[in-house]
Image: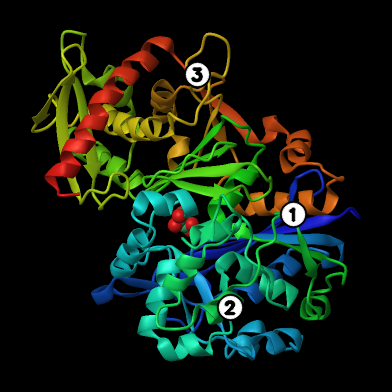
Amino acid sequence: MSGPLYIGTDLSTQQLKALVVDSSLKKVYEAKFDFDADATGYEIKKGVMTNEAEGEVYAPVALWLQAMDTVLARLKDAGLDFSRVKGISGAGMQHGSVFWNAQAEKMLGSLDPSQGLEKQLQDAFAHPFSPNWQDASTQKECDEFDAVLGDETELAKVTGSKAHHRFTGPQILRYTRKHPEAYKKTHRITLVSSWLATIFRGKFAPFDISDVCGMNLWDIPNGRWHPKLLQLASGQFPVDELRPKLGDVPEDGGAHLGSISKYFVDRYGFSSDCEIIASTGDNPSTILALPLRQNDALVSLGTSTTFLMSTPQYKPDPATHFFNSPTTAGLYMFMLCYKNGGLARENVRDAINQATSIEQNSWQQFDENLLSVKELARDDESKTMQLGLYFPRPEIIPNLPQGEWHYEYDPKSDKLSKSEKVRESPKEDARVIVESQMLSLRLRSRELVNSPGEGLPPQPRRVYVVGGGSRNKAIAKVAGEVLGGSDGVWKLDVGENACALGSAYKAVWAVERKEGETFEDLIGERWDESQFAEKIADGYNKDSYEKYGQAMKGFERMERELLKEHGR
Ligand code: XUL
């Protein structure tokens, strides 16, 4: 009852969560604040405000201050002895920026512990809102970012990603245009992650080495701000004014940024030597929830689909994202981020249930179909493979509008032809949709995976699944058949906590590491697999893996044809 404790926080679109772990990585306390359910005084829906006419999505920053005090008070009520907390790190939704004014740092440093943060810091911002990652208002700015170094491929080479609406550089450029007066008053810009560290530290905290890669401003191969991109983001204002607003970026993801601000010591009873550790983005933090080895893949099956890998290879491409590893120099996080995932699968499930008059939300029939229909929905090899794309929302990968498309592919003759729907609809849709989501992941990660053992084709060693869809073992089975996974498909059993846990583990590592000890080594030693992960499917199966290898050719051509058809 006296050992050190560590706090990890997760500030996401709809809630602020805090988890407390001990040195053995065991979770000992947890508290959260749901923005829609718990906040007072803000006109928000699902944590954000929207201006549909301009595609804007943004959050009131003061709301997060209300959340911060409440979450800490809830931890206190739960019995946490704050004096045992030796380190705090955090995870913030990626890309969102906060615009602080020139008085902010003074306010941060002189907070009265008898009053809350919201009341005392509401005037610390040059602009009261933070653009959210769902924002789509920056098409013009993205076109400028993609063009400034030549084309989107060049931008991806330098910053790890082509221009995206949500990325902070295009957002800052739009801010200079839409709110020039507020921009002039902006003394410092933090990301959501460095906002968290700033609050705890009571001084501006730098960006972390991973989350800075979500801005389209950081030159990843050279480890510096890219001058031309900073110039572009400054808009009508001198570039020399933007540079100090951004600050420096420490290379060490475990850097100690200083001790906790006096406000938290006096108000909650933290020890004054509690260290603030760089906070990172929510996706980089998610890969820290387990000792993810090189050549392991993590698939998050939520409303959207995210695919994450930790890799020493930097192979940027406009369709994917590369970030620096949040902890380990020389490693990168590879990410695929899709808009369509769970919702698209639910639509198919609903159609199946309607056709068989089964209870609406049950996955039973969907799963039965998924497992009984053969690979690529063909009964035998004399039939064509059935391929499809199911996008109830406009997709990022590939860049196609909302729609559903079906194709048939004969691998022997390499003939691809369009069709109306699957041969047996909606039964076979269950198989075709899950395969299509997994084929897209396999296609885009094929250059990064290596052979995990003698005689095995390149594929991940393990595929970990998280998020709502990870409860479905039928989906996991098909995921393994398509993606491989020589050591199987594993469900990461940490509920919705992966991201907050990752940041708590980062704090453990940063404070307790020995000289030169990597995150992977320290967490790998302490992580009790039997407690946190469960093998739910076999993974690699030679026969299926080869069939999907053939199908991938048709899949790639299908995407290319559709992109051409849509003038993309
Ligand atoms: C990643 C992205 C989202 C947010 C979610 O690029 O925009 O995953 O990080 O919070």
- Mark positioned earlier in the residue sequence (3 or 1): 1
Q: Is residue 501 left or right of residue 256?
A: left
- Find residue 119 and report its horizontal and vertical position in percent: 62, 89
- Residue 496 visible: no
Between the residue at mark 3 and the residue at mark 1, the CA separation in whole angstroms equals 36 Å
Residue position marked by numbered label 1 in the rendering: 254
Between marks 2 and 1 in the image, the one whose residue lies nearer the viewer: 2
Q: Residues within 10 Å of mark 1 (few under 14, many from 20)?
A: many
Marker disc for residue 538: 3
Residue at 21% from the left image edge and 28% from the top image edge: 387
Residue at 75% from the left image edge and 85% from the top image edge: 109
Residue at 47% from the left image edge and 37% from the top image edge: 470
Residue position marked by numbered label 2 in the rendering: 245
Q: Residues within 10 Å of mark 3 (few under 14, many from 20)?
A: many
Between the residue at mark 3 and the residue at mark 2, the CA separation in whole angstroms equals 50 Å
- Looking at the rendered structure, the kind of residue marked 1 is Gly
